[in-house]
Image (spheres, helix red, strand yellow):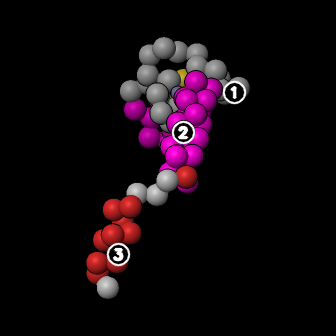
Amino acid sequence: MQRPCALCLRLMDSIGEPISSIPVTKIYKASHGMCKTCGDRWLEQALQDTQPQAVTRPPVLEVKVSSNY
Ligand SMILES: [Zn+2]
């Protein structure tokens, strides 16, 4: 079964390995899924994005809220 990756639009096989280096043009019936490469990259970015935000909050938002009241 071949389906395109949702991010890089390259065809991948059933285990998520990209089998084509050329992105498919347009497949409207694309199933939701990422190839292994994009999946790993997405997971890394997601972890990197959530960790610092959980530790430090932007103080600008709190100032705006308090000034409204
Ligand atoms: Zn991909």
Asked if residue 28 is positioned above or below residue 4 in the image, the reply reads below
For label 2, the residue is 48
Q: Quadrant of the N terminus?
A: top right
In the image, is 63 to the left or to the right of 50?
A: left
SS at circle 1: loop
Residue 53 visible in the current orientation: yes
Depth check: 43 or 25 in front? 43
Foreground: 40 or 7?
A: 40
List x then y, in percent, for residue 32. 56, 42
Q: CA distance from mark 2 to mark 3?
A: 27 Å
Q: Is residue 16 left or right of residue 54?
A: right
Residue that numbered label 1 is attached to: 14
What SS does tag 2 mark? helix
The answer to which quarter of the image holds residue 44 is top right
The magenta stretch spans residue 43: yes
Q: Which residue is mark 3?
A: 65
* Camera-side mark, 2 or 3: 3
Q: Which residues are magenta?
A: 26-54
